[in-house]
Image: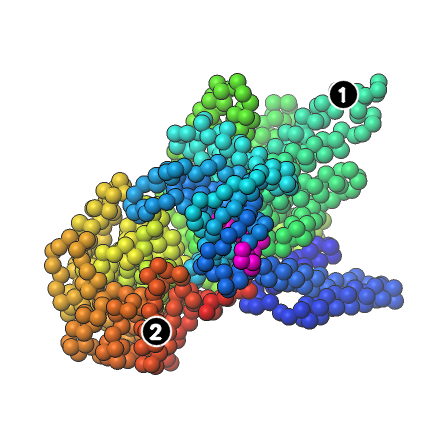
Amino acid sequence: MLGRGLVVSGVLGVVAAHHLRSLPSPWVVGLGLLVVVACGALGSWCARIRPHVAWQWLLGLPMAACAGFAVTVLCAQHRLAQGLDDGNVDRVSRVVLRIESLPKLQPDRVSFVARVLQAHPSGVPDVIRVSWPASGWRSPYSEARAANPPFPTLHAGQVWRMALVLRPVQAAQNLHAFDYERHVFAAGIRAQATVRGQPELLEIQPWHSLSIVAERARHEVRVAMAPYLEGLRYGAVLRALAIGDQDGVDDADWQVFNRSGLTHLVSISGSHITMLAGLGALCMAAAWRRLRWKGRSLVERWPVRRAAACAALVVAWLYCLLAGWEVPAQRTFMMLAVVAGAQALQLRLTGSRVLSLAAVVVLALDPWAVLASGFWLSFMAVAVLLAVGIDGSAIRPTATEPAAAVGRFTRILHGLKLAARLQWGVTWALAPALAWLFHEISLVSPFANAYGIPVIEMVVTPISLLLAAAALVPGLHAVATGLATVAHTALTWMMQPTEWLASLPTISVPAGPAWLYLLACVGAGVALWPRRGGQHSGPARTCLRYRAWAWLALLPMAFWRPATPAEGEWDLYALDVGQGSALLVRTSRHAVLFDAGARHARDSDEGARTIVPALRALGLQRLDALVVSHADLDHAGGVRSVLAGAQVEQTFSSFDLVHWSARESRQLEAPDTPSALAMSPCVAGSHWRIDGVSFEFLWPLDVQAVRPSRQANNASCVLRVRGAHHSVLLTGDIEAAAEARLVERGLTPVDVVVAAHHGSRTSSSAAFVNAVAARHVIMQVGRWNRHGHPNEAVLSRWERAGAAIWRTDWQGGVNAQSRAKGLTMYSVLESSRRYWHGRRP
């Protein structure tokens, strides 16, 4: 028990290190290591003087925590020192690099992870992510076309000389959103690069390292499988099951998998690896019993169980390499390695000890593994399976001497009951973690997994692997074609009921404080704690008897609702959507969205990427109003996704939104955009009042029925929000001419203003700045945007007027809270900064 406690303490030390805003100085790390040594020496002395288990606990736990903390900080300091020099930011560098990963292929773009071998000028990180786009401009509505000339065949081991524009990895920062910078830092990638000109292939190093060999093998399998998967609806899913290459899986399919709880089956999960390892062990055991050497059976020389364990470990290792060596694969392999080692050394290890040793090895190899949700989900799932399996194994048939047929029936019934218990336990034990990540709980997961696990684990995945093997062998074209057909047919049949289940409602779980999820996890742990037969007695037995009540600990999480503003108060969320606009105003019981962000491609826009997840995290399933200031794609590009992802009662726009949406649907070759219950133009003088907060349009003076493409920035909607204590002005993209008319019409001061046109030099005129007299100005801009927003003269103008400047490119999402006690402004990045977040000016 002490060893497992030390593991938990060490993991907590690693987690604590990753929650630092900035890394401590080396002397602090040295002090931590000194504490570790001192605790170890004191523990040894106490054990000799007065042996007692309490000393081991009191000294061992802080020692393990300090060790985990210090080692993690040292590793983080080393990785942080490998950043991109400021002099190389957004400039062309000449780099010689080696491709290290399986390239991500798109018709108009190729990206990969590379190791830098030489760079001029110096100061380029060792590991970078390279994006190689096709030449020419492409509309966000146009289909991705193949590059002309086509990209060369890229694979791991190739050494290229490239001209690259390098930038540090900086991504959008919003509350309760995925932290891409954390993900990239954990992978060791310290810069992103874009190819310029025509790269030159220098040489190929196919055997440079084991990882290169594995990535080349993945490339060969992908190329061999491509002809057989072409044109298949779920061909990308079959490839993902075979080699872990998830490129090409539709976002709509991922949504179905997430809502039905089948995501773990589509990824290379521990169950896939364990299944293959088990098959390898069975084959080795069968062969080992029959093989002989020098007249003696191999069984006499080495036990079958050890040989089978080694074979299982080798098969698992090879498949983990083929699957990309992600955290779930690492965890599974480490657990299998511990089990195989125990078999070889004839040690008896419980499941919890195996899990603990696997966690230690995984974190020793990669201290950033705890930053991946897969680490927690995979280890929690295995822990639940172990607990429920131990508890379920205590069930015995009541008949003492059943007949053979009755015995088989009883065993089958017992197996079904155990499978149901396992699925039930995993579903609800992982509910807190999934609610934390996705802000919803799927009620259909047990039903989808009931048929999904057998179909994918027993049919689709083995056939996909056989397809990969057959595709590599010349002359087996007919066999590979048949395997692809069978696997795809089985997957198609499985997806039909799955899509229906995914369409059913889910439980929305707004983002809440951490103690809610911890309480739910503790409740699930108590409810699933195994009885272990008659080992418990007295109070422990009484507690276990009523342990089912512990499931009630999940209720606070399910029914949590975040605090909302009081009557007359409001919250403003200026979302970080890059070079675009999206502002959410929330009152006591209502919400209004002003603009919907940009559209980047046919299948990518800020409505689906940022706005809808933000609404879900805030517990908002409906919008009382959606205001689309004008028809530019950086303001209206996400309208379609917002209307599809939330119930919108009313829309306001300065253009014909119905005509614009119909044209967009034709360009996307998609069904018509869902419409709001009512649509109206935003005309000066229109106003409404909700929850003690007034909303009034100040501009435009009238809306003409012209085509959206002819709308100018000066036709943008301008909305003023006035609460009982403070006011805010949302300006769209109006320019100096419209600003002058607003000043002439008697524009009054406000507390917060969103700078017009992202701080362009054509807006924020001196008369307008003086008239609004804002204390705070928010600028929604994208880092390194091609327009040069915000303009330096505009920044100086606002600063001279005494306004505090908030920029989403530097500070992430900006939030304002109007309360009776005052106006509070804060940025997402500064309130949740971690040491891996790149330095902003």
The percent position of residue 94, horizontal first and vertical second, equals 51, 52
Q: Is residue 124 magenta?
A: yes
Question: Of the residues shown, which amino acid type is indicated by label 1?
Answer: Leu
Q: Is residue 398 left or right of residue 152?
A: right
Is 195 drawn above or below residue 824 in the view shown?
above
Is 453 drawn above or below residue 128 in the view shown?
above
Q: Which residue is located at x 45 percent, y 35 percent? A: 236
Q: Which residue is located at x 47 percent, y 52 percent? A: 164
Q: Is residue 374 left or right of residue 563?
A: right
Which residue lies under the disc numbered 2? Answer: 795
Which residue lies under the disc numbered 1? Answer: 291
User: 220 or 745, which is in the foreground?
Assistant: 220
Structural distance between the alpha carbons of marks 1 and 2: 81 Å
Q: Which residue is located at x 74 percent, y 68 percent? A: 35
Region of the chain picked out in magenta, as a range: 120-130
Q: Is residue 392 visible?
A: no
| Crowdedness near tag 1: few (<14), some (14–19) or many (≥20) residues, C-alpha within 10 Å | few
User: 739 or 86, which is in the foreground?
Assistant: 86
Question: Of the residues shown, which amino acid type is indicated by label 2?
Answer: Leu
